[in-house]
Structures are given as C-alpha cells and as structure tokens.
Image (cartoon, rainbow, N blue to C red):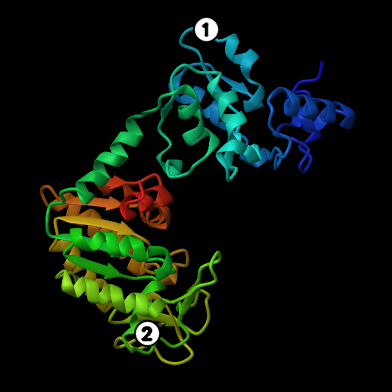
Amino acid sequence: GINAESTKSLGPQPKAGKTSFFAALPEEEKKRLIDRYCTDMKASLAKVPGFQEELSLRPVAIRLKEIIGQEVHFAPDCMSAGNEIAKLKAGEIILLENCRFYLDEDAKTEKDRQAMSEKLASYADIYISDAFGTAHRDSATMTGIPKALGHGAAGYLMKKEIDYFAKVLDNPKAPVVAIVGGAKVSDKIQLLENMLPRINKLLIGGAMAYTFLKAIGKDIGSSRCEDFIENKKTGEKKDVQQLARDLLEKAKQKGVEVLLPIDHTCHTKFEATDAALTTEGIDIPQGYMGLDIGPKTMAMYKRAINDSMTVIWNGPMGVFEMECYSRGTFGVAKAMADATATKAEFLSIIGGGDSASAAEVCGQAARMSHVSTGGGASLELQIGRA
C-alpha cells in the first residue's frame, strides 16, 4: 500500500492535504476520505491549509530521539493517529504531526474547534501543557483538549515561567525597572499601564520612544511615529500621542520616573550604514530617522539598571538586526547580565520575543535570571489578561 515514506519524493501539493501521503492519493480517494471525516466527526475538517514540509515536526522526532536516547515514534497525521497510539507499549513515546496543518486548530469559535479537540483528547488520559509560548491562545490543543478531558495540568517549563513572572508581578524586590521598546505604543500601552503600580522607573526605547518624544513637543525628524489607531470593529479613532501623554501623567502621579532617549543614532534611510549620525541632544534633524538610542541614553539606562534590584525587559531599543543600530539593545542586555552576575539577589527577566532573540544573538541570554519562551504569552501575563 501507499505510505508517507514511499510518497515523500512526490512532495506536498499546495492545499492538497496535511501529509505527502494524502497528497499522493488520487483526487477521488481524497474526496472520499474528506467526506467520511465530515460525516463521522460531525464537523468540517476538510478546510486545511495543507502540509508544508518545512513546518513538519518529523525532524523534531529525530532530534528528540537523539536527546533522550530512546525511540520516538512519529504519526504523520495528528487526526488519524489512533492506530499508531494503540500499538504503543508502556514507556514508549509518539510525536504527532503539526496540528496547525488543520485550520480547525485556530478556528475562531469553540464549535469549529470542538471536533478536533475531542479527536485529540481521545488519544489520552492525562493532559499536561508545557507550551507557555502559546498558552495565551484559545485553540483546539491549548484549551479544547483539557476541556474535553475534564482536566489539564501545567508542566515544569510552564511552572518556571509563571513563578518568575510572579516575582515581578506580585512582590518584586525594589527598586524595580521596566524597560520597554519595540515599534508601537498602541501595542504596549496596556503593558505600560499595568506595570506602573509595580515599578520605580520606566525606560522607553525603540520606535515607540519617538511617539512619546513627539507627544512632549520634541523634533523627531522622519522617525517612525504613531498618530492615530482605529478600532476595526467600531471605527473609533484614538490619538496615540494623547495616550502617551496620559501615560506620562499617570506615571508622575504614581511616582514612577520615566526615562526617554536623550540622544539617538540616526540615518536618512531605513538601511545599514557606516556613517550613522549620532545626535548631540534629544532632537532629531529633519530628514533623519532614529534607529537606535545614542551613547548618552545608553549610559543613562545602564545607571538605572545598576541602581535597581529587579529589571524586566520587553522590546528592543533599536533595529538590532543591523549591526550599526544594535549597540543600544545589546548594551541593555549586557548591563542586565552584568548586574545579574555581580549583585546578590538581582533579578533580570526578559519577556520573550525580539528581546529574547537579541539577548541570544549578543550572547547574554544565558547570564539572565530568566528568558521567557513566549513573547505574546508573557505580554498577556504582564498585561493581566492571564
């Protein structure tokens, strides 16, 4: 008969199915199988984005075998793995193929996800999740399976993530500094507001700093800046610079010192250069865009980090992917790592995402107290939605 290995050379066909096995079947056979799924499972599982070789978890099974020194079986279709699972002996392991090859995994409604959740739940007796990076998503595997089973538990990684963020959110050791960067104020405004009661200083960098600087009347040249955001559902528009001014006022009322860049590394274009302009002061000349914090700002932020006992970082200070604009982001990472190494009980936490990537790239990640595995999840946790 046909099997996934024997048809692998045929390659996946766009939207043909989840695996090369399915892609190799005649069109009539595909239609018959799809119709059976729709009838037997009382839900449409036919709408799949299709198998994509580069997203297959087969290499993960091979690597996991190497790490644990034990055979790791692989089920090429997560929705028809019952026979493979039934053959497992006590202590054996099986890895299911990527469940996101089914649109039902991330369907918007619980009803659309239910059939997939129940099918996957039928394979198991106990559900344990260690996927902190996706813990904030309402999906068939994250929320659907434990609901179908009637229980769910957190794994060791999940516990570690929650324990570290609890140290910051519940009873952090003062002084506490939050470092927030990235592109948009609108993406981080809830995070900023939620952190204010817990912190002593707020350091702002990245493109969002230019929105704050413009909001207080500074010249930002052609730097990226948010003016308005629109609610797609209601059409309501909000003035982002007013949101920034409101945040600064709330910080003042709570006694939180907000530090904004006082100099910048700039260029006329969004591209790497050997001739970047470093401004003397806080204003950016016309025709130039800020792409990283300047050396004076870095020195100021380093002092703030050194004077603290708890630092949580979410978002880069500049376009660190280009070496000429990486000094601010890498400098913050090194300052945090150095403080962690030299100060007793100092706590340094990176909230995943680009900050974690930057810390890895510059070799400082291993020196932090904790680097989160989930950017979106850690943001949701800090905002207070989880």
Mark 2 touches mark 1? (CB < 8 Å): no
Q: Amino acid at mark 2?
A: Lys
Asked whether the viewer can see residue 189, the reply is: yes
The residue to which callout 1 is attached is: 89
**321 and 372: which is toward the camera:** 372
What's the residue at 70%, 39% (across, down)?
48
What's the residue at 69%, 28% (across, down)?
42
* Real-space Cα separation, disc 2 to disc 1, in angstroms: 64 Å
The numbered dot on residue 133 is none
Badge 1 element: loop
Location of the N terminus by quadrant is top right
Q: Position of residue 266 (x, y in %)?
A: 42, 81
Q: Position of residue 95 (x, y in %)?
A: 55, 24
Q: Amino acid at mark 1?
A: Lys
Q: Is residue 104 left or right of residue 311?
A: right
Q: Is residue 313 left or right of residue 132?
A: left
Earlier in the chain: of badge 2 and badge 1, it is 1
Q: How many marks?
A: 2
Q: Tag 2: Cα neighbours inside 10 Å, few (<14), some, or many (≥20)?
A: many
Closest to the camera, between mark 2 and mark 1, is 2
Outermost residue to the front: 234
Give the vertical position of 91 relative to 8 (above or below): above
Q: Residue 136's image quarter? A: top left
Q: Position of residue 376 (x, y in %)?
A: 42, 51
Give the vertical position of 5 relative to 142 (above or below): above
Q: Is residue 245 left or right of residue 7?
A: left
The residue to which callout 2 is attached is: 214
Badge 2 element: helix
**73 and 298: which is toward the camera:** 73
